[in-house]
Image (cartoon, rainbow, N blue to C red):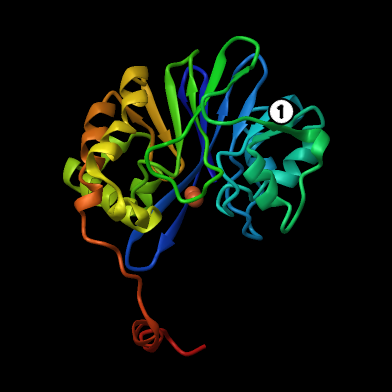
Amino acid sequence: MKSYRASTDISVLNDYLEVPGLGFLAVNAFVIHAAEPVVVDTGLGLPDRDFVASLAEVIDPADVRWIWLTHPDRDHTGGLFALLDAAPRARVVTTFLGLGIMSTENPLPLDRVYLLNPGQSLDVGDRILTGFRPPLFDNPATVGILDAGSGACLSSDCFGAPLATAALASAQDAEEASPEELRAGQLLWATVDSPWVHAVDSAKFAATFQPLRDFGPSAIFSTHLPPATGASATMFDRLLEAPQTGPFTGPDQAALEQMLRTFEPV
Ligand SMILES: [Fe+2]
Ligand SMILES: [Fe+2]
């Protein structure tokens, strides 16, 4: 995991995974350096990852006041409980449904939870963070963030894209990938992560971007894309094609066996 300051008050904790057949997918978490510091998502839970140690490169974990869990998928919850231990004053921002999903495996302590629905806001001392429902999502507990202080949009899974190389998945600007690669990758990810998009009314889907257009983000920070600055309208327009994009079908057993035959015997 590497970390860097993407803007005056937002740090990125960047990780990635290789997804066979698709490419390299960024798995980012973020720190909003507000008066009451906010960690947004907590990365992968793989045994060789240490989220709190990575976080300590950008902020003293004990200073964290909020852990905004954009949704409780496992690529977002890896360091959650270790961080709750390391940050005794922090509370987890999630929804009633997010709390319920967590309770099926490892319940969150209720006195450490803060329930917030899309449209509601959180005062973190020097700015207001407002929750919103991203146009694309893979989990009904998803709540992204509009940061009134920095103008940034933190979009959870939405706007992600598998990219051709690990270097691109770790890039500090999405525009290090070509516009063609970004377009193909974002539309692919839309159909992989939000397969329901093929069943939606295109006009109603387009209208879900309006709150974002009205906000006019200075930058978009997706969990699954390098930071995107200054090209948000292009990103919105690109995803409008998602309902018409061909559906994704994953490899089946025959494809898996074909893949296994290419592996070296142990
Ligand atoms: Fe997800
Ligand atoms: Fe994700």
Residue 123 position, x and y percent, is: 63, 15
Residue 211: horizontal and vertical position, in percent? 36, 24
Front residue of 61/78: it is 78
Q: How many marks?
A: 1
Q: Amino acid at mark 1?
A: Asp
Residue pointed to by mark 1: 60
Question: Residue 199, relative to residue 255: is it above or below?
Answer: above
Residue 163 visible in the picture: no
Q: Residue at x 35, y 87 (%)?
A: 254
In screen coordinates, is 204 left or right of 19? left
Residue 65 sits above or below residue 237 on the image: above
* In this rendering, position of residue 221 left or right of residue 165: right
Q: Vertical placement of 134 versus 265: above or below?
A: above
Q: Position of residue 162 (x, y in %)?
A: 34, 53
Say left or right for 145 vs 178: right
Of residue 230 and residue 217, the one placed in the foreground of this image is 217
Residue 103 visible, this orientation: yes
